[in-house]
Every structure is written in C-alpha cells, then in structure tokens.
Amino acid sequence: MATSVTETERKYEAPSDASLPDLTEITGVATGPEEFDLEATYFDTDDYRLARAGVTLRRRVGGDDEGWHLKLPAGEDSRQEVRVPLGRAVKQPPKDLSSLVRAHTRGSDLTPVAEIRTNRRRWQLTNGNGQLLAEVVDDVVTAQTMGSSTTTTSWREIEVELGEGGDRELLDTVERHLGDAGIHPSSSKSKLSQVIGVKRDAIPTIGKKSTAGDVVLAYLHEQRAALQNQDPRVRRNEDDAVHQMRVATRRMRSALQAFGKIVDREATRSLTDELKWLAGVLGTSRDLEVLRARFEDGLHALPPELVLGDVAARLTRHFAPLEAKAHKDSVAALDGERYFTLLNSIDALLASPPLTKLASGKAKDVLPKLVEKSRHRLDVRVEAALAANNNDEPLHEARKAAKRLRYSAEVAEPALGKHAKALRKRAKDVQTLLGDHQDSVVARPVLLDLGRGDENGFTFGLLYGQEVELAHKTEAALPALWRKLSKEHL
C-alpha cells in the first residue's frame, strides 16, 4: 500500500573541512547526531526523462524510512514523496509507483541508472515542547552510475528538511547560519542529478527584451510542466487534481489558439484538437465533482427542518458509482497511446516551435493586439447573450470567450505587467460569474431526476429553485461586470 508525504527541504554544498554551526543557537534544542548508512538504487529511462522532469524513483535500504520512494515536484523547495514498502522487488519498481510516471516513460523501460551510498549524521531541531521543527543531516556520499560505462564520484552535502512545526522562515534562518560557516546552496536539486550530470528542464525566463515568441513559449512550457505534474495526482485520485490537469490542458489550447499568429496555428491545429479531447476525457470526472460539491453545499445551507429524508445518503448513492467509473475511464485514457502521442506532440512543439515572423517582434508591441482580439471576441459573445431571449447557450459561449481572454492576458502578463494583470482579473470575474450560471444549467436536470426518485423529493425541489434563482442573479449581474472589464486597457 502506497503512502504519501510532502517534504520541504534545501540542499547545500559542504567543503570537506567545513564544520556545522552550533545548531542550538537556531531553535534552542538540537538533539543528535544519529548515524545511518543508506544504500539506494535509482531508476530512470535511458535518456533520464524522470530526472529532466524533476522526478526521482529509488529503492533505499537503511534508515527509518527505507523502501521504494517516488519524489514528485510540489512547488518551491517541496516534493511529494510516495512510498511503498521494500517487498521482494529489486530489479523493477512496484507497479504502484511505475504507473505514476507514465506521463514521462510513455512505454519506455525503467532501469537502474545509479547506486548511491550515504553515511548520514542527523540532528533534530525542536522547540521547548518537543515539537520537531527541522532535521539537519550531514551526508558523505559515494555514487556510481550504471549502464554500459560507469563513473564513481563522492562529495559531502548538507540537507535541511522542515518538520511539522517548522516554516520557511526557519529554513532561511538555518541557511544564514550555514552560510556563515561557509556552507552554501547546492546547484543540484538531488543526489541523482549530481551523479548523472542531468538537471531538471528549466522553464524559460521572461525579461524586458523578450520577444513575443519567448513569452508564448515560456507559458507553454509552464503548462506542459503543470500537466505532467498533475498526471500522477489524477491517477491517485487526489483532491482537485482533475481540475488542475484540465486547466493546464485548456490553458495550453487557449494559448495556441489566441496566439496562432506567433506559434503558427496551422502547424498546431491537430495538437489543439487533441488537447480538446483530453479536456473532454477529464471533463466527466470534473463535472461530477463540481455537481456533488454544489449539492452538498446547498444541502448544508438549508435549515435542518427543510431537509426531508436521507438526502445526503441519496447523493452518495447517486454520485459514488458515477465518480468511480469516471476516474477509471480517465486513468484508462492516461494509459493509452493517444495520450502518450499527445505528450510527444507537446514535446516536439517545444523542442522545435513553428514560430512565425511575428514571433521575433518585441512582446510589448505584438501581444496587446492579439489580447485585444480575444477581448473583441468576448464583447461579441456577451452582446449576443444579452440580446437573446433564451440565453443559456449564448451565455455558455460568452463564458468560453471570457476564459480565452483571461488566459490570453495571463500569457502576456509577464511582459505587459499590471495592465494585463488587471484585465486578467476582470476576465476571470466574468468567467466565474458565467461559470456559476453554466453549473446551474447543468445542475437542474440532475436535481429533477433525483427529485423524481422513490424517496421524498421536496428537498431536491428546494435546491432546484435555488439554482433557478442563482441563474437569474448571474444574468442580472453580467452587464455591470462587463462594463468594469471594458475599462481595462493594455
């Protein structure tokens, strides 16, 4: 059975003759050192796809957390570590873990790429109540690559990992003390990257002189990373994972469509079609998730005397099997060749982007016109929605246009600054309002079906009425939000 923890740590290069500072000066209490001998075998593809994505997979013996460890990116200084007990497997990682890296392996084999032995001394920093604030470890490392040719290297490094009671301010404090002792941040994020000489793929940075192509490509790099980072979370059915993966997919698709005069639209048309397919695959799970939460929130907001019958249990009976099937279908799609081909297409696009002549222009000159084109698209959709008598579908089209404008402004924000940020926020407000309306449209027929069941349908009728009222309120609020958006200019 796999378990998961989130670790936040920093690594430091330590000269062989450097002495650790007095750790008691940092938190008042420092126990240790405890000493461990650790042996780990690291697995990756032949071309180090995991390492390039900031992912590590190892089998480690020794210490108080020995076992199979999969470390996944989880933000600045943090990684999610999924653990499986050692078991009998030695030559191949457990399926529980290898399945979580399929967005990177895509059918390629995982093989041993390095063996690392560590002599570790560990200190625990605690407060006066005995709560663990941080661990400081001093590692002497000997590592050997594996494969057709091998190299052996050794070094010393310091790691500082937060405990449950610690925070980033404590990390900064420890870092200052280490710096005073001549111990400075490491250029390698993991022991494996140091021994194999492969660093994580970096997202391009944007500056004042960046071209329009630079800005759009940096955004596409971000969304590829987000999509791949959410993949294992979707497989593990973690909270909000489907939503975040779907958002990354839609952001990438919107960027390719809105900036098709920078990254040639014709060359990416098939990719945008496949991104739409993936968003649709994830959509069933997300729609069910939103509806269930919406109904549960509405139910909890009702006075108890208006909840007739076991409504909560009825919701569970309705949604549980549907959500289970949707999750199974999503994972099946993520294990399929069509998905792997899509990921390969994204990689190929970023490796050799089909840029147009316009891409070489200054971002501040080129991007505003394209963002304004997305604004015009929204204006047309909102006008059509407000003029329509039966305006559910036109409002849905306006919501999609608001989303494209939001993401277009988001792409341009690093180059255009506060004006793009303000436009993005206003577009998000419109999108959120119209999203509530669309959720109400989707919710009403489901509530009707639930209310027609054998049990008392009174409470579902109340929830239906609330959805109708909410839809009217969103329709009434749209003109004011639209006017606010129209005042924002790049």
Image (cartoon, rainbow, N blue to C red):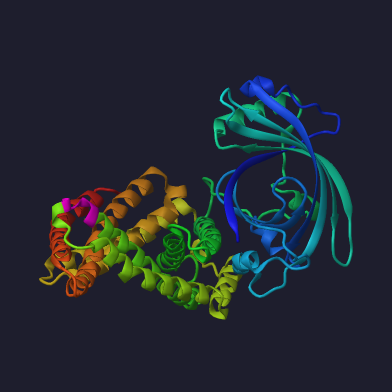
Q: Position of residue 89 (x, y in %)?
A: 74, 66
Q: Which residue is drawn at the image coordinates 74% and 52% (left, top)?
A: 193
Residue 53 left/right relative to 275? right
In depth, the one of 170 and 295 nearer the eye is 295
Q: Quadrant of residue 94?
A: bottom right
Q: Position of residue 62 (x, y in %)?
A: 78, 48
Determine the residue positioned at 85% across, 33% down. 16
Residue 345 vs residue 118, the one in the foreground: 118
- Region in magenta: 299-304
Q: x, y percentage for residue 173? A: 61, 27
Residue 176 visible (yes or no): yes
- Is residue 303 located in the magenta-colored stretch of the structure? yes
Q: In the rendered picture of this protein, how many numbered marks are placed on residues? A: 0
**Left or right, residue 89 beside residue 274:** right
Q: Residue furthest left?
A: 389
Q: Main secondary structure of the magenta part?
A: helix
Q: How far across and down, in percent of the image, does residue 220 sit?
A: 51, 61
